[in-house]
Image (cartoon, rainbow, N blue to C red):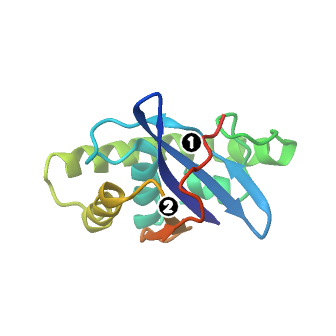
Amino acid sequence: MEVRFWKVKRNGRGNCCWEATRGKRTRVPGSAMALGSEDRLPHDIVQYVIEAATRYEGGFWDLLARGATFKSTGRKRTRPGKAIIAENRAELIESEQLAGRHAREWEEGKRTPVTVALDRARAQWTALQLNEQLVFSWPSPNGEVRVVASATQVVPR
């Protein structure tokens, strides 16, 4: 699964958007979230990097890669997609707690097993221009910056 994050300006405010592609054609539009300060990583990138760097199975991004259909995405919920979530509900909850612990320690300047990956993602995100995307291939915690054809990127829902 490929996951792309990008910045957009809407009503004078910065937003982070994302979209995932499973297989060759299954697009999963993510949500748009307001950006805080320019040097702060958005929650969804933090969650992605921590789940990937810890090789966590059963978290949001792993379940999305396996076909889960969440209400928060722009895809129709399916019976198999809901079943994946139901079967992994405890792991999904734990993934948020795991990410919260790592993110808190990282923000406090403590070293964790994911510090290098989060530092790299923050540097890439901070430098990201409006005509670029930060692209990850699940389950790699290492993203790459790609220039997109158009400087105007779509804002999900």
At a point 49% along the width and 59% down the height, the residue shown is 131
Residue at 25 percent across and 48 percent down: it is 39
Q: Where residue 86 sits in the image (x, y, percent)?
A: 71, 40
Please give left or right for residue 43 compared with residue 36 in the image: right
Q: Indicate the secondary structure of the residue bearing disc 2.
A: strand
Label 1 or label 2, whichever lies nearer to me, is: 2
Q: Residue 21, located in which quarter of the rendered image?
A: bottom right
Amino acid at the residue labelled 1: Ala
Foreground residue, 6 or 86?
6
What separation in Å lies between label 1 and label 2 (alpha carbons)? 32 Å
Q: Residue at x 40, y 57 (%)?
A: 129
Q: Secondary structure at mark 1?
A: helix
Q: What residue is at 38 percent from the left and 37 percent from the top?
A: 35
Q: Which mark is residue 90?
A: 1
Q: Which mark is residue 132?
A: none
- Residue ID for mark 2: 133
Task: Check the image and name the residue furthest to the top.
Answer: 11
Outermost residue toward the left in this view: 109
